[in-house]
Every structure is written in C-alpha cells, then in structure tokens.
Amino acid sequence: MRMTAPTKIMLIACGSFNPCTPMHFRMFEIARDHFNQMGTAEVVGGIVSPVHDSYGKKGLVSASHRCTMIKIGLQSSDWVRLSDWETQQEEWTRTRLTLQYHQNYINSVLKDSNSINDQQIPSWLPEGLNKMTGHVQLKLLCGADLLESFATPGLWKDEDIEAIIGQHGLVVISRAGSNPEQFIFNSDLLSRYRRNITIVTNWVTNDVSSTLVRRLLGRGLSVKYLLDDYVTEYIKKHLLYGSSST
C-alpha cells in the first residue's frame, strides 16, 4: 500500500507577548512533537506574531520592545521566527486577517518559487520554502484559554471564528485536567469544524504567565528561571514593567 506524504503545515501564535515567556515558545515544540508522533503532518515552520500597540491592553509595552524580546527569546530556535507584520500596520488587526495575510504570502512564494530566491523571502518564512512542493497550511496555535474565549459575548465575530477554524485550522495546547472536547461539543459552530481542531495535551504543566511575570517585576521580585536570562536582562536595562536595573 502506497503511503501518502504528510500534510505540510506552519504554526502561528498571535498575542501580546508582554513579555514573551518560555511557555509561549514551548507550545510550538509540543505541537510539532504531536504531529511528528501522529505522522499526520510535517511542521515546516513557526511564526510568533505580536499584537499592534493600539490593542489597548493595560501595561502593554511598545511593539519595538516586545519584538526585540521575542527575537532574544527565539535565538536558540532554528524554526520558530518573529513576524512583525501586525505591529507595522496602522491599527490593530483582527486575528482572522493576520492569518489570511501570512497564508496568502506563503501561497505566493510557493506559486512563484522559480522567480524567488532565499534573499527575497521575509525572515518569518522558513528557509527553503520556495523549494517546497505542494500546499503549506497555516494553523493558529493557541492555549485552551483562547479556545474558551470564543464563547465570550462580543469578543469574537462568528464569521471570524468560522474563517479561522474553517479556512486555516486550530491547534490547541491544553492543560491536563481541562476539557476542551466538552467545550467544543457545547458549541454548534466549533462542532461543525471539529475536524480542523487539533487538541494536544501538555502533560508538563507550566502556569507561568506574562501577567505573573509583570506582577513579580513590578514588586521588585526575582523572575529568574521564569524568563530567558537575556530577556530579563533586556527588561531591566530598559526598566520595563516597573522593574529596576539592579
């Protein structure tokens, strides 16, 4: 029996990354391991897309700082990269449009691969993408909290949820003990696109959040081993989140 080649996919995580934590990046590794073990897809790249400054979240530091911290935090990764496209727009961009932009760009590179060299490819795309054959599907990588936010009245438009899951797909990193399957079952919209939602359980729990990090920094407490040392160094150098330089 002839085996079919696994689907090629890229993962994109959208959010504030204020600041980025190791768990933000760990999600990419957990997802890639899952697809490798299942043999259902080949993950060819990962994208971190921080939100625009106009998002209006309290305590959000500038995109310039957040992008720099992401670059620092990703120095050891050879496949997850920063895209600053969202931050370069005139205003906040809906997640649906962010996915569409990146998917369209991926499609254009694959379509015109003969006329594009590696030097012309944006830094957020994996090297050698223009040499790949077949379709590369972009999927939104997120935690269970984002999935559950779909039920928050007024937060998401139904057409956006439908486009994100129906046209792209969702990869949800779930904590042990949570029940995303029940949440999906309770939603007619999510159930309709269940085949496009991949649930991956993270058995090594890590509850370190950006909120917790900001709180500790603001109180002058240590965040060592919670953040990349070089990210912490950058935060203190620029006195971000109420931290001191000492």
Image (cartoon, grey):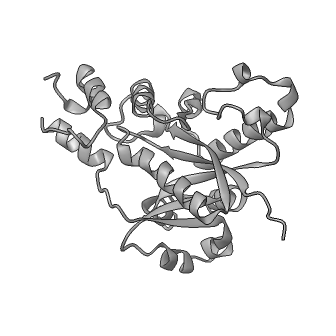
- Measured as percent of width and height from the top left, residue 128 is found at 71, 32
Q: Residue at x 73, y 58 (%)?
A: 6
**Residue 116 horizontal side relative to residue 76, left or right:** right
Give the tally of numbered discs.
Answer: 0
Q: Residue at x 56, y 40 (%)?
A: 47
Residue 65: quadrant of the picture: top left
> Which one is nearer the viewer's eye here, 90 or 12?
12
**Residue 117 horizontal side relative to residue 187, left or right:** right
Q: Residue at x 42, y 25 (%)?
A: 68
**Residue 216 horizontal side relative to residue 176, left or right:** left
- Measured as percent of width and height from the top left, residue 132 is found at 78, 40
Which quadrant of the figure contains the C terminus?
top left
- Does the rendering let one see residue 153? no
Measured along the vertical axis of the image, is residue 125 above or below residue 31? above
- Does the rendering let one see residue 240? yes
> Which one is nearer the viewer's eye here, 191 or 200?
200
**Residue 160 horizontal side relative to residue 145, left or right:** right
Which quadrant of the figure contains the N terminus?
bottom right
Q: Residue at x 26, y 30 (%)?
A: 232
Residue 76: quadrant of the picture: top left
- Measured as percent of width and height from the top left, residue 36 is found at 59, 58
- Measured as percent of width and height from the top left, residue 78 is found at 53, 35
